[in-house]
Image (spheres, rainbow, N blue to C red):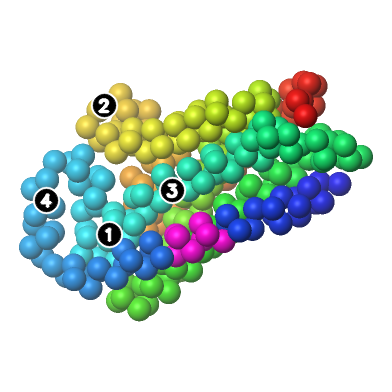
Amino acid sequence: MWPEAWAQTMQDSRRSLLWWAIGIALYTVMVLAFFPLLKGNTALADLMQTLPESLRALAGDNLGTPAGYVGGKLLSTIPVLLTLYAALQGSALIAGQEERGWLEFPLSQPLPRGALLLGRTVALLTMLLALGLTLFASIWLAGQVFAAPLPAGRLAGTVALHVLGAWLFGALTLALGAATGRPGLAVGVGAGLGTGLVVVQSLASQVQVLSDLAWLNPWKYALSDLPLERGANAWPAVICLLLGAALVALAAPAFGNRDVSQ
């Protein structure tokens, strides 16, 4: 039953997904187009070493190399963009439609609420994976054009860490929306926590407590562990995937039992 809910959600969301994909692709090309100006620039590397460590953590240390430039100038902002997309979509799929009275039709069908929630959860993950594929293709192709080639395997692993990190906060938003029916609360918690942890991770090298707890932050593995240079660890991505699924599963009983306004 849930595949029907998935297909309908993908159909309804295709236009917004397309525009987000186009925006990410254009942003990627725009950023990488400036790399030839910085490639091999030793003066810039020396300047970066004079900056405080917190600023270097945000901008990257090796902007003259493809991996350092892509990681420091492009991928450092992607967690915020993907988290915002995931949170906005996650809040809209159940709670947002309920607030607008658009759940009346799907709930009137012989479709269990659990199947509806599952279908829309899988749709959210599918949309994020589609944006991840767009991001991967854009970086790889633009890298060939602008003399910033990257190993496909490391790039794929890095993009996976970003996508599944955003998925965790999108799933949290979807779960809160399904459990409470309050889209504003859901998107505030999901987007606020996801983007706030990006800032926290940028400060971790300067604050000992944050550094000690950094292993709990999913953005540590995508940003601070330099997966483009050192290779990505698959386990953080798998854990984010499973935690996101678990959050939605925990919200399913509340969604199934509460009085959904129509």
Spatial separation of the CA atoms under disc 3 and disc 2: 28 Å
Q: Image height check: is 251 above or below 83?
A: above
| Kind of residue indicated by mark 3 | Leu
Residue 54 pos. (x, y %): 21, 39
Main SS of residues in magenta: helix
Amino acid found under the numbered disc labelled 4: Gln
Q: Earlier in the sequence, mark 4 or mark 1?
A: 4
Whether label 2 touches label 4, CB < 8 Å: no
> SS at mark 1?
helix
The magenta segment is 18-25
In this picture, residue 261 sits left or right of residue 208? right
- Counting from the top left corner in percent of width and height, residue 120 is at 71, 44
Q: Nearer the viewer, residue 164 or 19?
A: 19
Q: Is residue 181 visible?
A: yes
Neighbourhood count class around disc 1 (C-alpha, 10 Å): few under 14, some 14–19, many 20 upward: some
Which mark is in front, 1 or 3?
Answer: 3
Q: Residues within 10 Å of mark 2 (few under 14, many from 20)?
A: few
Residue located 19% across and 43% down the image = 55
Please say whether residue 129 is visible from this viewpoint: no
- For numbered disc 3, what is the local secondary structure? helix
Residue 49 — which label?
4
Instruction: Estimate the spatial distance between the alpha carbons at disc 2 and disc 4, rounded to whole Å.
Output: 21 Å
Residue at (51% x, 50% y) in the render: 163
Sequence-wise, the earlier of marks 3 and 2 is 3
| Residue marked by disc 3 | 81
- Residue 242 bears which disc, if any? none
